[in-house]
C-alpha cells in the first residue's frame, strides 16, 4: 500500500472517497491492534504469582487498555473500514452512502483513539490515579463508539439504498449481508455502552462515586469484552468467509439462503448488552446466558458444514486467503465450544478471575479465541482483497500471519482456559503460572500476525487483473484493481447471487435460480 505524496496529503485528509477512508481505517486499525495486544500481554503478566513486571494498578490499566484497544481500536474499526471499502463495490454502487459522514466517522474515531492513548499515558483509564485523566478516558471512549456507529450507519444505508438493479437482499454477497446484520446489532448494543460511559463520567465528575467509583468502573463496561457481546466482532468474519471460500473453491455455495439465515441467527444470538456483570445476581447461571451460550454454537457449526461442503465439491488450490479462512473458522468453532463449557454450571469454571477485573480467566480465554479469529479474518481480507485495496498481490508474509494467528489464538484461549480450570481441578493448581505465560505468548503471536498482515498489505506490488482469482463471483471483481473513481464503467446484470459466475456461464445458481 503506497503512501501518498506530500502534495496529495491535503486531498487525502479532505477526501470523501470511500476507498481512501476504508484504507485509512484498515491501516490504523492494524497498527492499534498491535499496540493494544502488546499492552494486554504486559497486563496479563499481572496474573502470575509474582505479580508480573508492574504494580497491581499498572497491570490493571494495561489490561483494560488492551481490552479497549483490541475491541474499539482494532476489531470494530477494521471491519468498518473493510465495509466502507468493499460494500459499495459488492453492491455495484459508485460511492458509499453519506460519504462526508463516513469521513467524519474516521476522524472522530481516530481522534478518540489518540485521546484514549493520551489519557492512559497520563494516569487515566480504569484503575488510574488521575481523576481528570480518567474523565478524559470515558470521553474518548464515547468518541470511539460514536465514530464507529456513524460508519456503521453509512454501511447499512449503502446496502439498503444503493444496490444495483436486480440485487435483492437475498442476492447480496455474504460479506455485505453480514455487515448489514453487524451494523444492526452494533447500533442496538453499543449505545448501551455509551450510556454506561455517560453514567460513569457524570458520577465521577459530580463526586457521587456510585457507578464512577474505582471498583465499579470496570464492571460497568466489562460486558463488552465477554460472551455473548464479544461475538458481535465476528459477524463480518463469517460473511467474509462466505464470499472467499466459494470463490477460492471455484464453486457456488449450496443452500446459500440457509447460510444467510445462519449468519443472521449468529448475529441475533450475539446481542449481549443485557448481560451486565455489574448488575445484581449471578450472570453465569442465568438461564438466558446459559441458553445463548449453547445456542450460538449451532449457527457456527452450520456455517462450518456449509463451507466444508463447497470445498469438498470444488477444486480449491492452497492459497494464503484459504489457509487464513480455515484458521478463522477453526478459532470461531473453538470459541463457541469454550463458551458452552463455561456455561455448564457443574464445571464451575468461573472461580479464578483476572487481576481485579472480576472477569473469569476462562471467559477471557474464550474472548481471546474470538479476537484471534478476527485477526485471522483480517489476514483473510488482506490476502483476498489486496488487489482491490493496494492494486497488487499481498506479500509472502501473509501466510506466516495465518499461522501466527492460529498458534496465537490456540495459546491465548487454551492457556487461559486451563489457568481458569486450575481452580476447579487440583491436578492443574501448580501450573497456573505456566498457563498464563502460554496465554501471554499467544497474545504476542496474534500481535505478530497483525504486523505481518500489515507488512503484506504495505508490500503489495505490481498490477493485478480485475479478477486475479479467475473465479470471482461478486461485483467487486468486475472493476479494476484498484478501483478507479466511480468504481464501475458498467455494472453487470444481477439475476443471481453470483453475477460474475453468470457472465462466465458457470451453470445454475445453487438456490434454483438460472444463470444469465
Image (cartoon, grey):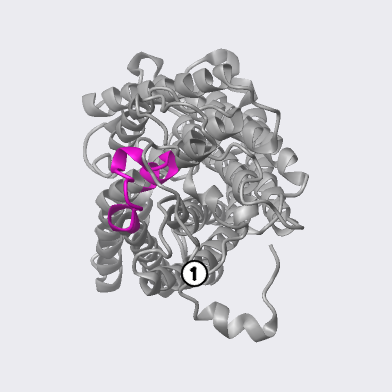
Could you tell me residue 336's position as x and y percent?
A: 44, 26
The part of the image, by quadrant, that contains residue 112 is bottom left
Disc tally is 1
Please report the residue visible at 50 percent of the width from the left and 18 percent of the height from the top. 309
Does residue 438 appear in this view? no
Could you tell me residue 110's position as x and y percent?
A: 49, 69
- Nearer-the-camera pick, 131 or 169: 169
The part of the image, by quadrant, that contains residue 153 is bottom left
- Nearer-the-camera pick, 175 or 281: 175
Please report the residue visible at 21 percent of the width from the left and 39 percent of the height from the top. 280
Point out the stretch of residues depicted in magenta. 158-179
Q: Is residue 163 magenta?
A: yes
Instruction: Please determine whether, in this image, residue 4 is positioned above or below residue 287.
Output: below
- Nearer-the-camera pick, 141 or 119: 141
**Element under disc 1:** helix
In the image, taking residue 92 as reference, residue 473 lies left or right, namely right
Could you tell me residue 55's position as x and y percent?
A: 59, 54
Q: Is residue 222 magenta?
A: no
Does residue 167 appear in this view? yes
Residue matched to label 1: 110
- Nearer-the-camera pick, 150 or 446: 150
Quadrant holding the N terminus: bottom right
Could you tell me residue 190's position as x and y percent?
A: 31, 53
Quadrant holding the C terminus: top left
The part of the image, by quadrant, that contains residue 289 is top left
In the image, taking residue 252 as reference, residue 481 lies left or right, namely right
Please report the residue visible at 23 percent of the width from the left and 41 percent of the height from the top. 274
In the image, taking residue 93 as reference, residue 506 lies left or right, namely right
Give the class, few, some or many, for how many residues have Cα within 10 Å of label 1's Cα (few <14, many ≥20).
many
Amino acid at each position: 500500500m503506497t503512501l501518498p505524496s506530500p502534495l496529495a496529503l491535503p486531498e487525502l485528509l479532505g477526501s470523501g472517497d470511500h476507498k481512501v477512508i476504508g484504507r485509512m481505517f484498515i491501516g490504523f486499525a492494524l497498527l492499534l491492534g498491535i499496540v493494544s495486544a502488546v499492552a494486554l500481554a504486559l497486563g496479563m503478566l499481572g496474573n502470575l504469582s509474582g505479580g508480573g513486571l508492574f504494580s497491581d494498578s499498572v497491570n490493571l490499566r494495561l489490561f483494560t487498555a488492551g481490552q479497549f484497544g483490541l475491541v474499539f481500536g482494532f476489531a470494530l474499526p477494521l471491519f468498518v473500514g473493510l465495509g466502507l471499502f468493499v460494500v459499495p463495490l459488492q453492491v455495484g454502487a459508485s460511492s458509499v452512502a453519506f460519504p462526508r459522514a463516513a469521513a467524519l466517522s474516521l476522524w472522530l474515531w481516530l481522534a478518540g483513539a489518540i485521546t484514549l492513548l493520551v489519557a492512559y499515558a497520563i494516569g487515566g483509564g480504569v484503575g488510574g490515579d488521575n481523576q481528570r485523566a480518567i474523565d478524559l478516558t470515558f470521553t474518548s471512549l464515547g468518541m470511539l463508539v460514536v465514530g464507529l456507529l456513524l460508519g456503521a450507519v453509512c454501511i447499512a444505508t449503502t446496502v439498503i439504498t444503493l444496490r444495483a438493479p436486480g440485487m435483492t437482499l437475498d442476492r447480496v454477497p455474504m460479506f455485505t449481508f453480514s455487515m448489514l446484520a453487524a451494523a444492526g446489532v452494533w447500533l442496538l448494543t453499543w449505545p448501551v455502552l455509551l450510556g454506561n460511559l455517560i453514567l460513569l463520567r457524570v458520577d465521577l465528575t459530580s463526586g457521587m462515586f456510585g457507578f464512577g467509583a474505582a471498583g465499579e468502573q470496570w464492571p460497568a463496561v466489562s460486558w463488552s469484552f465477554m460472551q455473548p457481546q464479544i461475538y458481535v466482532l465476528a459477524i463480518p468474519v463469517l460473511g467474509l468467509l462466505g464470499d472467499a471460500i466459494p470463490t477460492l473453491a471455484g464453486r457456488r455455495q449450496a443452500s446459500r439462503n440457509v447460510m444467510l439465515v445462519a449468519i443472521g441467527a449468529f448475529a441475533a444470538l450475539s446481542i449481549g448488552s443485557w448481560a451486565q456483570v455489574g448488575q445484581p445476581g449471578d450472570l453465569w447461571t442465568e438461564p438466558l446466558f446459559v441458553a445463548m451460550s449453547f445456542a450460538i454454537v449451532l449457527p457456527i457449526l452450520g456455517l462450518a458444514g456449509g463451507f466444508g461442503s463447497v470445498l469438498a465439491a470444488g477444486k480449491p488450490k492452497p492459497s494464503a486467503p484459504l489457509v487464513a479462512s480455515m484458521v478463522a473458522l477453526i478459532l470461531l468453532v473453538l470459541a463457541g465450544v469454550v463458551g458452552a463449557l463455561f456455561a455448564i454450571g457443574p464445571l464451575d469454571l468461573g472461580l479464578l478471575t483476572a487481576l481485579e477485573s472480576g472477569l473469569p480467566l476462562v471467559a477471557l480465554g474464550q474472548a481471546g479465541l474470538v479476537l484471534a479469529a478476527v485477526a485471522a479474518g483480517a489476514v483473510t481480507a488482506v490476502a483476498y482483497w489486496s488487489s482491490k485495496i493496494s492494486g497488487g498481490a499481498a506479500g509472502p508474509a501473509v501466510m506466516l500471519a495465518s499461522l501466527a494467528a492460529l498458534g496465537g489464538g490456540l495459546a491465548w484461549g487454551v492457556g487461559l482456559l486451563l489457568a481458569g480450570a486450575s481452580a476447579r481441578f487440583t491436578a492443574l493448581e501448580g501450573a497456573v503460572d505456566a498457563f498464563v505465560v502460554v496465554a501471554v505468548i499467544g497474545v504476542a503471536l496474534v500481535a505478530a500476525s497483525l504486523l505481518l498482515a500489515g507488512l503484506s498489505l504495505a508490500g503489495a506490488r505490481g498490477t493485478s487483473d480485475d479478477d486475479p482469482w479467475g473465479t470471482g463471483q461478486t461485483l467487486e471483481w468486475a472493476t479494476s484493481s484498484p478501483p478507479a473513481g466511480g468504481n464501475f464503467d458498467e455494472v453487470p446484470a444481477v439475476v443471481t447471487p453470483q453475477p460474475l459466475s453468470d457472465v462466465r456461464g458457470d451453470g445454475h445458481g445453487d438456490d434454483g435460480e438460472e444463470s444469465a
